[in-house]
Amino acid sequence: EKGGWPSFMAKEISEDPEAIENTIRGRFHEGRVTLPDLDALGEGYFREIDRIIIVACGTAYYSGQTAAYMLEKWSRIPVQVELAHEFRYRDPVVDERCLIVSLSQSGETMDTLMAVRFARERGAKTLSICNTQGATIPRESDAVVYTHAGPEVAVASTKAFVAQIAAIYLLALHAAQARQTLTDAEVAHILAEFETIPDKVREVLQHHDRIRELANWMADTRSVLYLGRNTGFPIALEGALKLKEIAYIHAEGFAAGELKHGPIALIEPGQPVFVLVPSPRYDDTLHPKIVSNIQEIRARGARVLAVAEVSDAAVLPIADEVFTVPPTDPAFEPLLHVVPLQIFALELSTAKGLDVDQPRNLAKSVTVE
Ligand code: BG6
């Protein structure tokens, strides 16, 4: 069943490209998104709402945080992302002009289900993005867009994470078409790039052997930090979560801009820090800021492990290791950047001799509150 891989998680990471491919397949034609799954929300629905709230737990929460950047940017609908178990206990403003999008691989997470029920009681419509046909959350929602990542067995979620981001991007483009917040040409351009992403993820997977060597060498590491800006911030959080879940290593993700406001105090000689570097080609503001963050932590002895675009000449000389990703539109960078972090957690857990698929104290789906 593991198809020759030593663990389900290893197999599932190798399926990241297909998870994206199968989630977008058949859902756009001739430069336009077609998602009949959303018809159930009603004609003209996306022109009527004034807010989207994404609710989720764990890895699904980070995919929501990541995809929210483009959902808001493309649709011009304000988006907030909430932990499902915090959301319903704080008397949030929720009404019929608000769409609740739940993200859940299993569709059975009780905290997320309770948030969906709560929102429906308040009169909001609910959309489930789910990887499991006929699960409880999609059954109780007004509409559902399934991710087609295939069954995910390992407790730590990987291919479902990238599929969730892909599904929200389709939702974002659908809403942008309905609200005319992107031109036809812009949508067509984004979709053309979207189609190339599975192959670009395949390229990033080629780093597996080198990441294994790094992880073997780092088997005694006590702490790893992750830095990113913009969509790289939630990717940093997700990278840290993966390491905690399966390698039992203290790990934290930070917004790189926050470094000087506190976390830089943690940097001491030898501290490994993953840095997610946005492409220098599109952005003349974020990239130099990340480069100076790298210089700041390096000056304090950090061991810099960078994920950067293949032609990024500024990063090569200042990082200890660089895992390159092919050029893409910044919207799609998170789908490439998360892959080395997934592999790193897998290989560090393996190097420590741990059970990668069944980490202690965790369950694949938590059906209690
Ligand atoms: C946790 C799992 O309990 O639930 C995580 O251990 C998962 O791996 C989280 O991300 C949310 O699960 P789901 O099925 O709602 O996406």
Image (tube, rainbow, N blue to C red):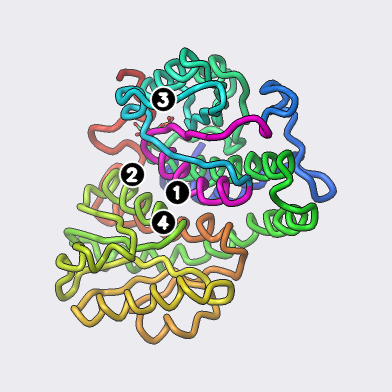
Residue 61 in view of the camera: yes
Is label 3 within 8 A of ligand 1 (CB to nearest ligand atom)? yes
* Of 286 and 77, the residue lying toward us: 77
Q: Is residue 51 magenta?
A: yes
Q: Earlier in the sequence, mark 2 or mark 1?
A: 1
Give the secondary structure at mark 4.
Answer: helix
Q: Earlier in the sequence, mark 2 or mark 3?
A: 3
Q: Which residues are magenta?
A: 46-74
Residue 15 in view of the camera: no
Decide if residue 39 is on the left or right side of residue 293: right
The quadrant holding residue 148 is top right
Whole-number angstrom distance, CA of label 1 to CA of label 3: 27 Å
Q: Are marks 4 and 2 in contact (CB under 8 Å)?
A: no
Q: Amino acid at mark 1?
A: Ala
Q: Which residue is mark 2?
A: 356
Q: Are marks 2 and 1 in contact (CB under 8 Å)?
A: yes
Whole-number angstrom distance, CA of label 2 to CA of label 3: 25 Å
Q: Which residue is mark 4?
A: 343
Q: Earlier in the sequence, mark 1 or mark 3?
A: 1
- Outermost residue on the top side: it is 121
The quadrant holding residue 227 is bottom left
Whole-number angstrom distance, CA of label 4 to CA of label 3: 27 Å
Q: Position of residue 170 (x, y in %)?
A: 66, 42
Q: Main secondary structure of the magenta part?
A: helix
Q: Amino acid at mark 4?
A: Ile
